[in-house]
Image: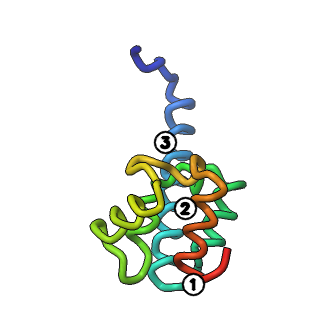
Amino acid sequence: MPLPELDPDQRRAALEKATAARRVRAEVKERLKLRSLGIRRVLELSEDEDAVAKMKVADVLGAMPAYGPVKARRLMEDLGIAPNRRLRGLGARQRAALIETFEGSP
């Protein structure tokens, strides 16, 4: 299916929206690395913030201190989270398991 043709104003608005979403996602990952944001808060943000909800779980876990791509993939396998899953698509049990893993209690 071909992409719809956008007039210059629509294109500019779409580019601005995409840039803002990338900024939000980058800030979330940076705050996770610095430990100024926890997984519970990220999951709460994903309920209201569309840009956060569209983040891949693997990217979020990879931004956690002491976690890289391999450790994130292993954790996702252990918790039954598909490799391409986004935060919005997590079930209640998966969310609780992530919180328990990183914060100790659901």
Which numbered marker is on residue 24? 2
**Callouts 3 and 1 close, C-beta under 8 Å:** no
Mark 1 or 2 closer to N-term?
2
Dot 3 amino acid type: Leu
Indicate the secondary structure of the residue bearing disc 3: helix
Tell me what residue is drawn at x 69 percent, y 64 percent. Answer: 44
Q: Quadrant of the N terminus?
A: top left
94 left or right of 72? right
| Lower position in the chain sequence, tag 3 or tag 2 | 3
Q: Which mark is residue 36?
A: 1
The disc labelled 2 sits on which kind of residue?
Val
Q: Measured along the vertical axis of the image, is residue 14 above or below residue 26?
A: above
Residue at image coords 46%, 18%: 5
Residue found 48% across the figure and 85% down from its top = 34
Label 3 to label 1: alpha-carbon separation: 29 Å
Q: Earlier in the sequence, mark 3 or mark 1?
A: 3
Q: Nearer the viewer, residue 7 or 44?
A: 44
Residue 55 image position (x, y, % from top left): 50, 54
Q: Disc 3 vs disc 1: which is toward the camera?
A: 1
Element on which disc 1 rests: loop
CA distance separating discs 3 and 2: 14 Å
Residue that protrudes farthest toward the right in the picture: 48
Q: Disc 3 marks which residue?
A: 15
